[in-house]
Image: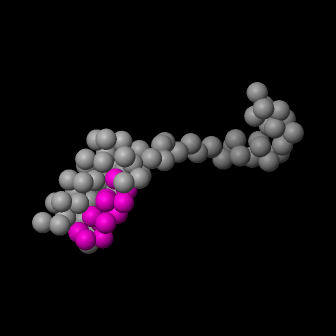
Amino acid sequence: MLCSRLRGLAQDCIDKHLNLSAIFYADKLVTFSNGAPGDVYLLAQVRGALDGPQLSLPRSAVCLFQAFPRACACFMAI
């Protein structure tokens, strides 16, 4: 009963783009449902919507930044 109510509140917050509230309810849901896979996915979905896609640089780009810091600083300023 409690889990279905929390699930509904989290989904309602997602639909209304209230991401911080959705994270709150989804986090409580994961706790009360003992980490049910669907509820963990819901929490991950909300966290992804809030954080946005993560940009990861390939290792070669990181090496270039370390090898040529002044050139990369000029590039980053553009």
Locate residue 5, reporting x and y percent. 18, 60
**Who's the residue at 77% across and 43% down the image?**
65
Which residue is situated farthest in the left direction here?
1
Q: Is residue 44 visible?
A: no
Residue 61 picture quarter: top right
**Who's the residue at 19% across and 64% down the image?**
3
Which residue is situated farthest in the top direction here?
78
Q: Is residue 58 above or below residue 5?
A: above
**Who's the residue at 34% across and 63% down the image?**
27
Image check: 40 left or right of 71? Answer: left
**Who's the residue at 74% across and 46% down the image?**
63
Q: Is residue 31 above or below residue 62?
A: below
Whether the magenta-drawn stretch holds residue 31 is answered as yes
Q: Is residue 11 above or below residue 39?
A: above
Observer-nearest of 5 and 72: 5
Quadrant that contains the C terminus: top right
Quadrant that contains the N terminus: bottom left
Region rendered in magenta: 22-33
Q: Is residue 47 visible?
A: yes
